[in-house]
Image: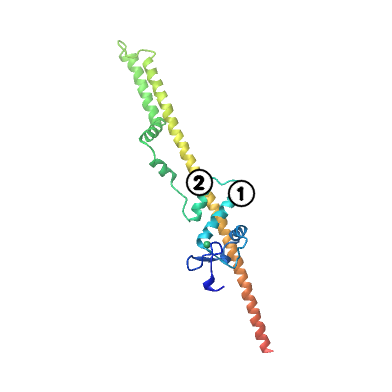
Amino acid sequence: MSKQHRYCQICKKDSMHVELIPAAIIRPAVSDYIATQYPEWSNEGYICRKDLKQFRYRYLYSLIEEERGAVTNLEEEVISKMNEYESLSENVDKEFNMNLTFGQKLSDKIATFGGSWRFIIIFGVIIFVWMLVNSYFLLTRPFDPYPFILLNLVLSCLAALQAPIIMMSQNRQEARDRKRAENDYKINLKSELEIRQLHQKIDHLLTQQWERMVQIQELQIEMIEKISEKKT
Ligand SMILES: [Zn+2]
């Protein structure tokens, strides 16, 4: 095929308009996939970069569909990022913390403080002092005499407030974990697919190299035979 007549087998554009890639260097897995879509596909021809990208995407898509039954949004994102050679890893914590409102940050802080030894000790001291003051120093005119009903009320109010705050904080923790797990899954899937692609590429390279070596060897044998013929 002369240089002037190279054209993309899919969109029929020639090498003047698009960048062409020889079909022979495409991985067999992708090449076979194109053949199932385009029966007239030939390994001798060419394909433009844009169409190849499109087919790579569709090949990956079909691969996942075949293995997992359906392609979710997550998986679709992985495939498109892979096709664009973009990185997937993101700092989930950083992104998550950036979008928190003031109330959410406050509830996180309160939940952290409420779950610390410092809080327990401070609170224990307050309760102790309260009881002491009401049972001894102010025995004549205690503001909350035994059995400390006002203290009881304060404690119940505190518990009632603390529970939803802790729950809010926990829900957010859970959402963050879910996001993290999602991100891990995406990265794992991408690595799995990339490694598989690399395997195919290396296999393809090895086969091609092997074929060339055999060709060179055949040439060498021919040359040796010619030389020996000349001698005799
Ligand atoms: Zn094309």
Q: Residue at x 55, y 59 (%)?
A: 198
Could you tell me which secondary element the residue under label 1 belongs to?
helix
Q: Which labelled disc corresponds to residue 184? A: 2
Q: Residues within 10 Å of mark 1 (few under 14, many from 20)?
A: few
In the rendered image, residue 219, in percent from the top left (x then y), is placed at: 63, 78
For this rendering, which residue is in front, 6 or 146? Answer: 6
In the rendered image, residue 197, in percent from the top left (x then y), is placed at: 56, 57
For this rendering, which residue is in front, 109 or 31? Answer: 31
User: Which image quarter holds the N terminus?
Assistant: bottom right
Residue at the right extreme?
Answer: 232
Please say whether residue 81 is visible from this viewpoint.
yes
N-terminal-most mark, 2 or 1: 1
Q: Which residue is mark 1?
A: 67
Amino acid type of the residue tagged 2 in the rendering:
Asp
CA gap, disc 2 and disc 1: 19 Å
In the rendered image, residue 168, in percent from the top left (x then y), is placed at: 43, 32
Q: Which labelled disc corresponds to residue 174? A: none
Could you tell me which secondary element the residue under label 2 belongs to?
helix
For this rendering, which residue is in front, 178 or 137? Answer: 178
Under 8 Å from ligand 1: the CB of mark 1?
no
Please say whether residue 148 is visible from this viewpoint.
no
Asked whether disc 2 touches disc 1, contact meaning CB atoms under 8 Å apart, the reply is no
In the rendered image, residue 93, in percent from the top left (x then y), is placed at: 43, 43
Q: Quadrant of residue 109?
A: top left
Q: How many marks?
A: 2
Q: Residue at x 60, y 57 (%)?
A: 37
Q: Residues within 10 Å of mark 2 (few under 14, many from 20)?
A: some
